Amino acid sequence: MSTGDMGAAAPASRTGILERGAGYMDGLRALPKHLTLKSVSAGTVAAIFGCTGPALIIIGAAEAGGLTSAQTVSWLFAVYFLGGLISLVMAPYYMQPVVGAYSIPGAAMLLGALKSFDFSHAVGAFIMAGVLVLLLGVSGLIGRVMRWLPMPIIMAMIAGALIRFATSTVTAAEAAPLLVGATIVAFFVTMRLSKSFPPVLAALIVGIAVAAATGAFQPVDGPVAFVLPTLTTPSFSLDAFLAVSVPLAILVIGAENAQATGVLLAEGYRPPVNAMTVVSGIGGILAGVLGGHNANIAGPMTAICSSEQAGEDRRGRYAAAVVNGVLFGSFGIFAGIAVPFVLALPKALIATVAGLAMIGVLVASFQQAFTRSQGHQIGAFVALAVAMSDIRLLSISAPFWALVLGVAVSLLVERHAGRTAPGPTGDR
């Protein structure tokens, strides 16, 4: 394995540490023609995914930590508004579907951590995690590592990490067969009959209609009101740094950014790895100041916005990320009002639509992971198995260990594996 194995990760030119993009003016000028039905629907589906189940994890962590309503809303505002802002900064400049959100595994980790630390120490740990990620981005280390990793192993990690979306669709069908069945049929029938109408949008429309007809929407509990965010003064401690900051920083890099990089590569882009890391670090610091655990590049939502569901022309799929950024940021601003209504959507419908939107990315990932000519087949299989296992070691989630173990096995048994195929030559 050599530095040439991941050449596709490096855009054609750089400005210091940060990769050079197409520029905002070019991105904004081209945006209107790329705001098609497909790009808008893909961005909307990604936003619905990010604003439903993941929001529940944050709300659960806030309840476990005994946070007030204002602190919970501040947390939601921080990660959603800043996550949306990241999309609006990155996507037009690079003209790539780079989507911002927050670390979902990081939020899940805090379900336990907030029982051990008061929120002021947690906020301090959030800020320190952002500083760690920023330093890694500024150093250029992450970009060098990603360029060294073999493409098949990264693609296998992506397939293993995202396969749960496909299996969740099957599980949802068992729980709500009529709702899920109608949604799936609408998706594939539209795919067969129409090349212009987005199958995922048809699936969402039919799913909502069936949910309304069968009374599957969950009632809105409690009052719906606008709540102003509140700031929490951070406190800093070594214990919180080791228990929260370090694992959270690794999750941002090893779970979210690595997934986003992999799916962009799978779709033929040359992702700006260093810039993605730097903006995730800045997002982490700002989110921490506002009481949120991190705002960074999103893995699954980038997968939705970079897939064929966002349009046949991959040069215009960044428009889906822009749509997502607007909706995501708006959700953060109006979190106190929006949360109850979004959470009323049936969980089975959310899981089904997200799984259907991932089909293209999963197929491409499997194809690139196990193409014999690219080599590293054993390492790729190990990465796939580890990522699918969803294990957590040392508070670090499976995608990170999938890369580590996949590379280790490949180095041990595949020393003469062929180099991976070269990536696309252009940034867009």
Image (cartoon, grey):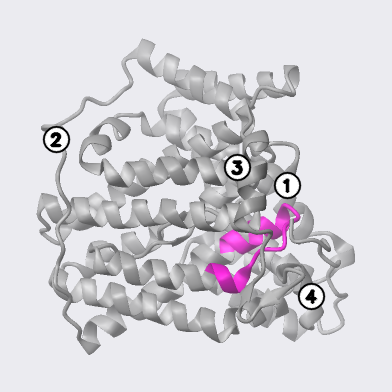
Residue located at (64% from left, 67% from top)? 272
Label 3: few (<14), some (14–19) or many (≥20) C-alpha neighbours in 10 Å: many
Magenta-tinted stretch: 259-276
For marks 1 and 2 on the same chain, the one whose residue lies earlier in the sequence: 2
Tag 1, which secondary structure?
helix
For marks 4 and 2 on the same chain, the one whose residue lies earlier in the sequence: 4
Q: Pointer 2: what residue?
A: 225
Residue 290 in the image: state x and y as whole percent.
24, 63
Residue located at (49% from left, 43% from top)? 324
Q: Is residue 423 shown above or below 138? A: above
Residue 64 in the image: state x and y as whole percent.
16, 58
Q: Amino acid at mark 1?
A: Arg
Q: CA distance from mark 3 to mark 2?
A: 32 Å
For marks 3 and 2 on the same chain, the one whose residue lies earlier in the sequence: 2
Q: Pointer 4: what residue?
A: 5
Residue located at (61% from left, 27% from top)? 37
